Amino acid sequence: MKGRILRRAVKLIDDALDLARRGEIELARDYVTLAKEYCSKTRTKLPLNYKRKVCRKCNVPLIPGVTERRRIRGKILIRTCLLCGWTRRYDLRKNKGENKEAKDGRNRR
């Protein structure tokens, strides 16, 4: 049952992305809201890659150049929703914690 609802929620988010590309932002927002309601009622989690396709504040699908701005400063990716201004930062360095340990010499036995 949960798998079927999760598949339906993922399908709704994919459809919302297509609608947002065509310019139907309000309908796309409704699709995302419905998908989130499905997951919350059944206590299932959306996969991380689908969570990152949606603005957390206004529930609009994030499409670079249409509803989202992407900037890279140093080694940080900055994603900004163009409708509400919500900002999220992602660190692009791969092994954040491992480099500190190797420099301190903690990996020695």
Image (tube, rainbow, N blue to C red):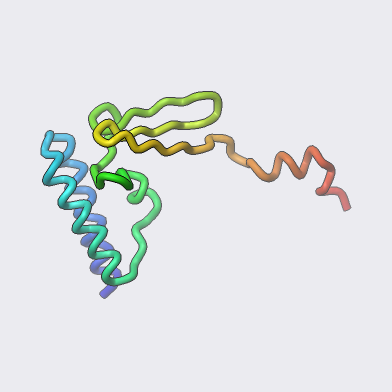
Q: Residue at x 27, y 31 (%)?
A: 82
Query: In which quarter of the view is residue 101 placed?
Result: top right
Position of 57 relative to 2 (above/below): above
* Image position, residue 97 (x, y; %): 67, 45
The location of residue 17, given as percent across then percent down, is 21, 42
Q: Is residue 39 left or right of residue 102?
A: left
Residue at 15% across, 39% down? 25
Identify the image quadrant of residue 75: top right
Q: Position of residue 102 (x, y in %)?
A: 77, 41
Q: Quick one: 15 or 84, which is closer to the camera?
A: 84
Is residue 70 or residue 107 the one in the foreground? 70
Image location of residue 52, percent across then percent down: 36, 45
Residue placed most toward the observer, 83 or 104:
83
- Seen at 31% across and 43% down, the residue is 55
| In the depicted structure, whether residue 64 falls above or below residue 49 | above
Q: Residue at the right extreme?
A: 109
Left or right: 108, with 77 as reference point: right
